[in-house]
């Protein structure tokens, strides 16, 4: 069972709908024992960073412990941004600190928000992109981005006038700035890959 | 590079998709849940659902519709029609909408845009503008509210600029003069707005031929094109539209 964290932010339902559509066992929950028992955790997020991290507070330690214990974690959009150390969206806010880096505004000169379908160059060794080839379009909708400084993180970039981190992977911790649940068939494949990662982790070695 | 977006628009009235001409003479175009799923499957970049019965009062029926649509649509979709409060926006986003468009309520209370942007992030907040050429001031457009039925003194360009400052993430710009006429978008209007703001602008109203879409992007400077009649009634598929634009050098997600 994959648990999608329910923490009072917009549109968590779409993520569940997408997992169900591809035949995954998924539950929307904020219950500690369900999160602990899950094969994988998805941290979604449609909200401003400060609001989202505030709503998540009670579950912060639980998610960090699970991630550090090796449980697959997938952060989406603001859920992805929360994996980093901090964000400067509407004030300075502390993140989960699972991946080194800061969430900062997209530089002036680009249209903000970065909204629409952009091409992501996918390194062959990132597990979320298995079977998708080298380049695919994904749907983005955000005004801040993660400036990743973590040397252990694998990064997939998209071009938005500069190399913008579209996805990171640090061991079992995965994050996508784009919305896989809203990226058509390509996005559904990314979610299926995450489900596969969870399945593999859950199976006794 | 960001691709140009092809966005079918579903105007919904009494749970059916309808399409009119200049906001009048509505004709039935199908079931919103079925049409939404079809466009998602066909490779549309996004969808817009506008509850055109609800321009004065927000109705719960749109929430139920959004839930059903969201089960089978795996591309972003915007919902609008009669939205007046941040709570209503929250309800729509929780039901499965990705963005919410506001129109009349934002004109009456511009602070709504800022409150929504701070709560949901500005990418969730779409300002819909129904624009009509001014009869008294040449080269100007006036903002109309309440489903286009009520003209205001507000200038379209000034309002677009102000909305960006307030936190709107995108502008859905409909020309009431060209809507449903199939004679092409109002690209003077599109150009004037896209030159004035830095947020994405969706051109709407008037698509009849494939070159109209090209013109809205190239002449009008639009980041996305909205269409209804030409895709609902089967004249063109989303794929045909994208292949055509790609053949003329426009970056699309094929």
Image (spheres, coloured by chain):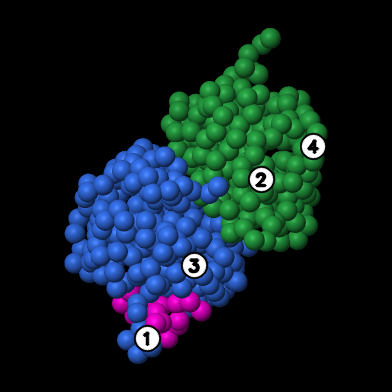
Chain colours: A green, B blue
Residue hosting label 2: A164
Relative image position of residue A33 (x, y in whole percent): 67, 30
Mark 4 vs 3: CB contact within 8 A: no
**Crowdedness near tag 1: few (<14), some (14–19) or many (≥20) residues, C-alpha within 10 Å:** few
Instruction: Choose between B56 and B103: the one closer to the eye.
Output: B103
**Crowdedness near tag 2: few (<14), some (14–19) or many (≥20) residues, C-alpha within 10 Å:** some
Report if residue B87 is visible in the image.
no
Q: In this view, does B137 lie to the left or right of A40?
A: left
Chain at numbered mark 1: B
Q: Residue at x 72, y 41 (%)?
A: A83
Measured in 3D between alpha carbons, the distance from the residue under mark 3 to the one under mark 1, in whole angstroms, is 19 Å
Q: Is residue A49 left or right of residue A19?
A: right
Residue hosting label 3: B194
Mark 2 vs 3: CB contact within 8 A: no
Labels 1, 4: one chain: no
Residue hosting label 1: B138
User: Closer to the camera: disc 4 or disc 3?
Assistant: 3
Q: In this view, does B175 lie to the left or right of A69?
A: left
Indicate the secondary structure of the residue bearing disc 2: strand
Q: Magenta part of the protein: which range?
A: B138-158
């Amino acid at each position: 069972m994959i648990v999608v964290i329910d923490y009072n932010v917009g549109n968590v339902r779409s993520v569940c709908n997408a997992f169900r559509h591809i035949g995954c066992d998924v539950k929307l929950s904020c219950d500690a024992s369900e999160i602990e028992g899950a094969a994988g955790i998805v941290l979604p997020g449609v909200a401003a960073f400060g609001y989202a991290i505030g709503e998540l507070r009670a579950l912060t330690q639980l998610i960090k412990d699970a991630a550090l214990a090796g449980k697959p974690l997938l952060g989406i959009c603001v859920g992805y941004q929360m994996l980093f150390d901090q964000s400067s969206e509407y004030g300075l806010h502390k993140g989960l600190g699972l991946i080194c880096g800061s969430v900062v505004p997209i530089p002036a000169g680009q249209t903000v928000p970065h909204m629409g379908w952009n091409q992501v160059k996918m390194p062959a060794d990132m597990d979320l992109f298995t079977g998708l080839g080298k380049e695919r379009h994904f749907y983005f909708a955000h005004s801040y981005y993660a400036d990743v400084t973590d040397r252990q993180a694998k990064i997939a970039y998209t071009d938005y006038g500069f190399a913008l981190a579209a996805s990171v992977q640090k061991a079992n911790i995965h994050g996508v700035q784009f919305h896989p649940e809203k990226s058509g068939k390509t996005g559904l494949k990314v979610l299926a890959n995450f489900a596969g990662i969870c399945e593999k982790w859950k199976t006794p070695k | 590079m960001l691709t140009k977006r092809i966005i079918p628009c579903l105007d919904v009235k009494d749970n059916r998709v309808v399409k009119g001409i200049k906001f009048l003479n509505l004709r039935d175009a199908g079931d919103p849940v079925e049409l939404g799923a079809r466009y998602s499957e066909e490779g549309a970049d996004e969808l817009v659902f506008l509850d055109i019965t609800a321009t004065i009062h927000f109705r719960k029926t749109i929430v139920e519709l959004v839930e059903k649509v969201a089960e089978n649509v795996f591309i972003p979709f915007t919902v609008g029609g009669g939205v007046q409060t941040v709570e209503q926006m929250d309800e729509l986003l929780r039901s499965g909408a990705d963005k919410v468009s506001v129109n009349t309520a934002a004109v009456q209370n511009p602070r709504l845009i800022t409150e929504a942007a701070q709560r949901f992030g500005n990418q969730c907040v779409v300002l819909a503008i129904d624009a009509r050429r001014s009869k008294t001031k040449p080269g100007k457009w006036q903002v109309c509210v309440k489903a286009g039925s009520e003209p205001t003194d507000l200038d379209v360009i000034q309002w677009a600029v102000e909305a960006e400052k307030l936190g709107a993430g995108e502008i859905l710009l409909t020309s009431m003069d060209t809507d449903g006429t199939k004679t092409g978008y109002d690209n003077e209007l599109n150009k004037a707005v896209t030159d004035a703001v830095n947020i994405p602008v969706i051109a709407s109203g008037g698509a009849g031929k494939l070159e109209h879409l090209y013109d809205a992007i190239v002449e009008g400077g639009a980041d996305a094109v909205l269409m209804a009649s030409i895709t609902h009634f089967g004249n063109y598929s989303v794929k045909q539209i994208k292949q055509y634009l790609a053949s003329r050098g426009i970056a699309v997600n094929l």
